[in-house]
Image: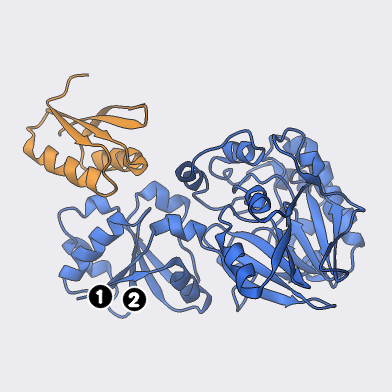
Chain colours: A blue, B orange
Amino acid sequence: MGIQKWTAAQVASRIIQKNKLFILDVRNEDAFQDWKIEGATIQHLNIPYFELLDGVDEILEQLPKDTEILVVCAKEGSSVMVAEMLSEDGLDVSYLEGGMKSWSEYLRPVKIGNLNNGGAIYQFVRIGKGCLSYLIESDGEAMIVDPARMIEPYESFVLEKGLVIKYAVDTHLHADHISGGRLLAEKTGSTYFLPPKDADDVAFSYTPLEEGKTITVGSTSVSVKPIHSPGHTSGSTTLLIDNTYLLTGDILFVKSIGRPDLAGKAEDWVGDLRNTLYHNYRELPDNLIVLPAHYSNVSELGDRGEVKAVLGDLFEKNDGFHLNELEFRKAVTENLPPQPNAYQEIRKTNMGKLSPDQEAQQEMEIGPNRCAIQD
Amino acid sequence: MKSDQLLDAKGLACPMPIVRTKKAMDKLESGQVLEVHATDKGAKSDLSAWTKAGGHTLLEMNEDNGVFVFFIQKK
């Protein structure tokens, strides 16, 4: 029987279209418990490949007959080995090309909407890690917000659409992934913006992202207004795009709110976070479309695989807006999920103080983003 | 630490370090010690987990200049 190779893009399409899929994950139990491919229609079985060296006979009964089977491992090698063994036993199976490493790195662009004076805004969903970045285009110019380490998807996107990247923006100093902002700016000659309060210690030059200094994408078309919104970090900045879209960074998510502890200053920043959410955001129009920098769970993905919400709806439904001061302090400082993998090294890399090689960067980014107060 | 046999799995990618380790262990007697050298980063956690799952004892594990060194005693 045959073996097929699936790309991360094919797996992502299955998840978004809610097709059934059975994943035989052959990584070790710790790796599986920590992080896996998730979806409403996905079933899992975790058996480490090293328990299958003598054969797969013992697990055949646990595999479905009527659902497609995808074998997944960390990098690919072990999943090919197990897929071959299953194939020899007469099963049709597939394996994930590049393993969880490629799953972590896959970016999927989805159009969010058009802008008032022409142009559009796109969300790049890093489905394996729950990171969201944005491309705003108008008049042949593009701005990328919170770009991922892998900049190739943005480069090919602008090439196809005939755009020039003029601006790369980080809404804050990230702790869960390595920013592609500096690399993008170097390669395309674009301007790299970073909030100055998050850049005390950075080892490179940047353009300050500051409230009151509107950036324009396209000649006069799209306004990007920075709003200082501290709490996740002290520099965290929200972007109001075209008076319609609110890019909330790691302050406000669809189902949760940002955590204040990743720079080691939870106690100091609790008040800032509360003030941002309960005062600054409350003064904004209810009909703004919230576009966050992360999501935690695939249930947050819409029908087209996008993540967004109306600000007024979040005021009502997001638990983060319904806590008194004491409850709020407890919620954002106690019983938080584990921190993102290698978050301290990732922060230092984003400050330009560490320059790990490509393989080390991939290793550092393994796992979910964990930037919200709840998993 | 003394070992009865050395397995050089440097440069091999997953799953080969464990496939080779298993083959080498199959040839050892109970109580004998296999020394494994590997460079694959995944080997670190996988070899530890495999040793435990098989009932063997991981006597020592260290890292020297990017090489992971394991001493595994057969059950």
Tag 2: Cα neighbours inside 10 Å, few (<14), some, or many (≥20)?
some
Label 2 sits on a secondary structure element that is loop
Residue that protrudes farthest toward the top in the picture? B1
Residue type, numbered disc 2: Glu
Label 2 and label 1 in one chain: yes
Q: Is residue A255 above or below residue A361?
A: below
**Residue A301 visible in image:** no
Which of A253 and A125 lies nearest the eye of the viewer?
A125
- In percent of width and height, residue A268 lies at 79, 36
For disc 2, the chain is A
Residues under numbered marks 2 and 1 in contact, where contact means CB atoms less than 8 Å apart: yes
Q: Give how far across and how far down residue B49 sits, in percent.
A: 30, 42
Quadrant location, the N terminus of chain A: bottom left
Residue at the spot of label 1 = A92
A191 lies above or below B53: below
Point 9% across, 32% down: residue: B30
Local secondary structure at mark 1: loop
**Residue A123, located in which quarter of the rendered image?**
bottom right
Residue B70 found in image quarter: top left
> Can the viewer see residue A211 in this picture?
yes
Separation of marks 2 and 1 at Cα, in angstroms: 8 Å
Q: State the mark number for residue A68.
A: 2
Residue B4 bears which disc, if any?
A: none
Closer to the chain start, of discs 2 and 1, is 2
In the shown orientation, is residue A22 left or right of residue A265? Answer: left
Among the 4 quarters of the image, the one containing residue A137: bottom right
**Along the horizontal axis of the image, is A335 left or right of A72?**
right
User: Circle 1: is it few (<14), some (14-19), or many (20+) Cα within 10 Å?
Assistant: some
